[in-house]
């Protein structure tokens, strides 16, 4: 029976020999018609299967090619070879699936990440992507464990929604109306009353607004699901479909929010380091080899494991937006005109500005607070005592080395009048959002929350540099394969 097989990771960790086992996996290499490197995806480490001469006929031996799948029954014995403590002496081998060696695109050699993106359906079979996606799994599991242990309620917020939480308008429309000839009103506008939901709907950009409804009943909730942005950004940091972790907490202010986000990030990293040591060691070495190819001036000061330990062992730096702008204005990079984008109070800081703060100035994660109200969303709480024209909100962004913003959050505006005024100023439909405003009408409380881009977290922990390499199937402009 198939369920009697033992996974290769478990077998290698047991270190026991002298017993009979059944393993299954895919051939990585086959040397001298005698030594099979077998892998089942549970670890990057292969199990060496020894095929004694005469066990298999010539026709079967020819079918043991790279990526062919095998069922092997044999005895676990001590290995005389270097780098492995045990091997499997095969008593019977069954080929479950053939693989044409001449057509299989993943030959046992190093492939570029660009090439592997073109065959994303097969890249899981490489050591690099095996490590990345086992770590991604651990970070997802750790997310649920972290919030569950703190008593948060996991809330499933809708993927299809009629609201735009960010107010940016970069949304994917959901409709059943005929694209070539939709029904129209007398003024020529599309008549969405005839659409499936009877109104204009889109894929969600955030579960936050619905999350606030849950938080004002359960005290603490979190969402963890896909979100969508129709932003035409072909960069190494943007995806059209990505996963967001969004906790919302009643009876919390901006400081509570920052404390939770910092604790959460450090928890995720510690969990991965504890449970994915082999995979992180592999990626650490991979990154070190890459760094050697760069000029000395462009090399990272820390290795991957060193960076992760540094983040878990040190408090994040906390500064205000105004302090951040002053640091940038006083920086050699600004004075020597090395920034592509200008620096002035009121700008929405670009990635180059954020990375300067964390990589050059502080050299550790930074939490920036007190952003100008004009560049932030309507639901963020206006700070008291601001100068006219320099209104700020109780917002916070966490900036991480290598990728810039990894978390965005705020204390939410709990004062009904101020929230309604802000929505009016930003030309948002107050009446249509009456369901959201009810949380302020009926027992409003100070509350806060944040969103952590899951792929950016995976980027940070794995040391990868392109966000398309940490999600199984990337959705980007002009790209929707599989």
Image: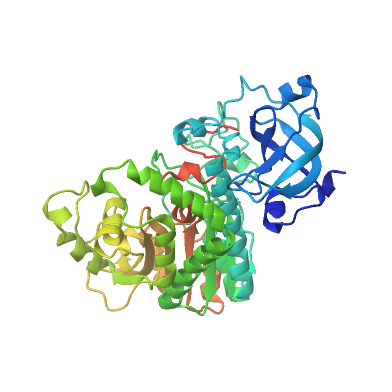
Quadrant of the frame with the N terminus: top right
Q: Picture coordinates of residue 234 (x, y %)?
A: 39, 38
Rendered view: 364 above or below 117: below
Total number of numbered labels? 0
Residue situated furthest right in the rendering: 1
The reply, left or right, for residue 24 in relation to residue 29 is right
Q: Which colour scheme is used?
A: rainbow
Q: Please report the residue visible at 56 percent of the width from the left and 58 percent of the height from the top.
A: 139
Q: Can residue 435 be seen in this view?
A: no
Q: In which quarter of the image is the C terminus?
A: top right
Residue 32 position by quadrant: top right
Q: In which quarter of the image is residue 344?
A: bottom left
* Nearer the observer, 336 or 234: 336
For residue 324, side relative to residue 439 (left or right)? left
In this orientation, does residue 303 appear?
yes
Q: Residue at x 16, y 59 (%)?
A: 331
Observer-nearest of 39 and 400: 39
Q: Is 153 drawn above or below residue 284 in the view shown?
A: below
Is residue 363 found left or right of 176 in the rendered image? left
Residue 376: % across, % down: 36, 60
Would you place residue 237 above or below residue 321 in this image? above
Q: Is residue 388 left or right of residue 151?
A: left
Q: Nearer the viewer, residue 273 or 350?
A: 273
Q: Position of residue 167 (x, y in %)?
A: 43, 54
Q: Residue furthest left?
A: 335
Q: Measured from the top left, where is residue 110 in percent x and y?
A: 48, 33
Q: Nearer the viewer, residue 206 or 453?
A: 453
Q: At 27% from the left edge and 78% from the top edge, which residue is drawn?
A: 385
């Amino acid at each position: 029976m198939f369920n009697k097989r033992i996974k290769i990771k478990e077998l290698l960790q047991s270190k026991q020999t002298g017993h009979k086992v059944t393993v299954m996996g895919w051939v990585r290499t086959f040397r001298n018609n005698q030594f099979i490197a077998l892998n089942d995806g549970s670890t990057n480490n292969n199990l060496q299967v020894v095929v004694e001469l005469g066990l298999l006929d010539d026709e079967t031996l020819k079918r043991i090619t790279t990526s062919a799948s095998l069922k092997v029954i044999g005895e676990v014995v001590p290995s005389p070879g270097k780098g492995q403590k045990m091997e499997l002496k095969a008593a019977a081998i069954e080929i479950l699936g053939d693989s044409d060696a001449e057509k299989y695109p993943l030959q046992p050699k190093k492939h570029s990440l660009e090439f592997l993106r073109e065959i994303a359906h097969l890249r899981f079979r490489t050591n690099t992507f095996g490590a990345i996606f086992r770590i991604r799994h651990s970070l997802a599991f750790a997310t649920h464990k972290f919030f569950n242990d703190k008593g948060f309620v996991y809330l499933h917020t809708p993927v299809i929604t009629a609201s735009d939480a960010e107010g940016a308008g970069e949304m994917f429309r959901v409709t059943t109306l005929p694209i070539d000839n939709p029904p129209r009103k007398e003024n020529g506008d599309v008549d969405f009353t005839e659409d499936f939901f009877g109104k204009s709907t889109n894929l969600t950009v955030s579960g936050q607004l619905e999350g606030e409804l849950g938080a004002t009943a359960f005290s603490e909730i979190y969402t963890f699901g896909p979100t969508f942005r129709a932003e035409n950004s072909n960069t190494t940091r943007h995806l059209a479909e990505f996963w967001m972790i969004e906790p919302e907490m009643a009876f919390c202010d901006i400081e509570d929010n920052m404390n939770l986000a910092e604790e959460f990030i450090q928890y995720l990293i510690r969990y991965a380091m504890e449970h994915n040591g082999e995979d992180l060691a592999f990626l650490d070495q991979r990154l070190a080899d890459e760094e050697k190819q760069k000029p000395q001036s462009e090399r990272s000061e820390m290795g991957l494991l060193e960076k992760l330990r540094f983040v878990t062992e040190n408090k994040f730096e906390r500064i205000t937006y105004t302090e951040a702008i002053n640091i940038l204005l006083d920086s050699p990079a600004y004075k020597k005109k090395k920034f592509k984008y200008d620096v002035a109070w009121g700008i929405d800081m670009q990635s180059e500005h954020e990375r300067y703060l964390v990589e050059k100035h502080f050299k550790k994660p930074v939490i920036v607070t007190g952003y100008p109200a004009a560049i932030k969303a309507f639901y963020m709480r206006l700070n008291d005592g601001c100068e006219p024209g320099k209104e700020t909100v109780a917002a916070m962004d966490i900036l991480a080395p290598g990728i810039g913003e990894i978390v965005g959050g705020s204390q939410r505006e709990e004062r009904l009048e101020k929230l309604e005024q802000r929505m009016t100023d930003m030309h948002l439909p107050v009446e249509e959002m009456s369901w959201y405003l009810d949380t302020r009408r009926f027992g409003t409380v100070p509350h806060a929350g944040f969103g952590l881009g899951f792929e950016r977290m995976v980027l940070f922990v794995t040391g990868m540099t392109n966000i398309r390499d940490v999600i199984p199937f990337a959705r980007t402009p002009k790209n929707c394969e599989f």
